[in-house]
Amino acid sequence: MHYHALTLALLSSATSTLAAQPYSTWMATSFLSKGQKINNHYVANVLYEGIQKAATFQKNATLLATASKAISSIVSSNGTIAGYDPYYYSLDDIRTGNNILYFWDSEGRKEKKYEIAAAALRDQLNRWPRTPTGGFWHRDPTYPNQMWLDGIYMADTFYATYTSYFDVDNTTAWNDIALQFDLIESHTRNKTSNLLQHGYDESKKAVWADPVTGASPHVWDRAVGWYMMALVEVLQVYPKNLSGYNRLKGYLTTLAEGVKKAQDTSGGWWLVMDEPYPGKKGNYIESSATAMFTYAYLKGVRTGLLAESYRDTASKAYDLMLQKFVTQEKNGTLSWEGTVQVGSLSGNASYEYYIGVPLSQNDGKGAGPFMFAAVEMEMWKGS
Ligand SMILES: *[C@@H]1O[C@H](CO)[C@@H](O)[C@H](O)[C@H]1NC(C)=O
Ligand SMILES: *[C@@H]1O[C@H](CO)[C@@H](O)[C@H](O)[C@H]1NC(C)=O
Ligand SMILES: *[C@@H]1O[C@H](CO)[C@@H](O)[C@H](O)[C@H]1NC(C)=O
Ligand SMILES: *[C@@H]1O[C@H](CO)[C@@H](O)[C@H](O)[C@H]1NC(C)=O
Ligand SMILES: *[C@@H]1O[C@H](CO)[C@@H](O)[C@H](O)[C@H]1NC(C)=O
Ligand SMILES: *[C@@H]1O[C@H](CO)[C@@H](O)[C@H](O)[C@H]1NC(C)=O
Ligand SMILES: *[C@@H]1O[C@H](CO)[C@@H](O)[C@H](O)[C@H]1NC(C)=O
């Protein structure tokens, strides 16, 4: 009896201490306590970007030092990124460049090894296999002539940030970045729903390729989430005096309308977003895309790209995440639920395929974007 009461008192005091923290750093600290390690894979990098954003906004120096040391640990003193093969072409592997550039910039732009590492990723894009019209292949040799929405986020956010720092007058590079968006837009955007199918095959050889557009048949929520974040991030650095700027902004504003229309009354978004699948058997509200859209709306509004009214859209989604996807463990740490493991165009890309992929707990592809969204929410609310 006594022991029980003491345990409860200890537990509730641990819980309330932690609960006094903002969600961003609370989730960050929780993931570190689960032993979340860094590597050059995009999932860890997205998660660490969440930790880094949380630490920076909440001014938690311990947490920021942890994220900084983690990135530093995968870049050797000569600028080699651990595990990175410059002759393996997979857009997912470019994402790590964003984490590297963040610390290069925020720590005074003096770390030479980060410049070398970023330049190697940038050089690789000059050799990248492309579709006949100039789109980066999602992966060579696995996905020839295919562009996926996911890849736009993985590579073009880095391409744009790198260009803004080191090569800002390279109009060819800026046009090339806009071209990646133009191509995916012209092949995958549904002009009625304003949503985009997962990807397309310019050679139309994939089993799922539409005979006219080459597009895959479904709108997969996380792919659209990556893409909407990519538009918001690239527009932060894209020169306003180049014609690509207004095109990208148009892509974002029309996509924002489509995504809002597709929002479920609960505040979240369905795994398979295209009609008539929302609400259909096997489909469900998925957490990673819900986090990504929340972030994209909030940052889009904060930076003047999107109308203020989208804060309501984001608030509804954020409330759902706190209620349904963020869970509190007995020891006071947070866990993250409801993220689908994967969505790939390696198979038949059918509705049955997407809904058959299992969920995973504490998945960085969801928890990272949740931290992005939490930081934006904390900026908005002022704490
Ligand atoms: C800062 O982060 C550290 C490491 O994750 C954590 O232990 C600490 O509670 C955080 N401090 C605040 C004030 O949130
Ligand atoms: C808290 O509990 C979770 C879930 O069991 C565990 O993964 C984590 O390592 C624990 N954290 C601490 C600080 O004990
Ligand atoms: C750079 O450092 C890494 C790790 O220490 C090493 O494996 C690699 O051979 C070095 N590369 C060059 C070009 O010196
Ligand atoms: C400018 O960008 C283009 C396209 O990426 C690239 O081929 C070229 O090497 C870049 N120019 C310089 C000076 O870096
Ligand atoms: C485009 O979206 C509309 C509205 O959801 C839908 O009726 C139509 O079938 C879609 N077109 C394609 C090609 O998927
Ligand atoms: C666009 O503006 C930037 C400065 O913001 C300048 O460096 C660049 O030369 C301009 N480019 C063109 C094509 O006018
Ligand atoms: C597509 O693949 C899924 C498994 O990923 C399978 O359940 C389904 O039957 C396949 N559909 C067709 C038309 O082959």
Image (tube, rainbow, N blue to C red):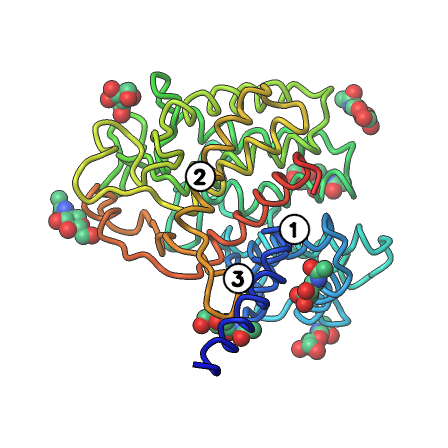
Q: Which residue is mark 3?
A: 41
Give the quadrant of residue 266: top left
Q: Residue at x 53, y 57 (%)?
A: 42
Residue 65 at what x, y percent from top left?
75, 65
Is 281 positioned to the left or the right of 171 in the image?
Answer: left
| Earlier-in-chain disc, 2 versus 3 | 3
Q: Dot 1: what SS?
A: helix
Q: Nearer the viewer, residue 144 or 300?
A: 300
Q: Residue at x 57, y 50 (%)?
A: 371
Q: Amino acid at mark 3?
A: His
Q: Which quarter is ligand 3 in?
A: bottom right
How far is the residue under mark 2 from the one under mark 3?
18 Å
Q: Amino acid at mark 1?
A: Asn
How far is the residue under mark 1 from the one under mark 3?
12 Å
Residue 35 seen in the current view: no
**Classed neighbour count for the residue bearing mark 2: other residues with Cα under 10 Å, few (<14), some (14–19), many (≥20):** many
Q: Which residue is mark 2?
A: 149
- What label sits on residue 98 in the rendered view? 1
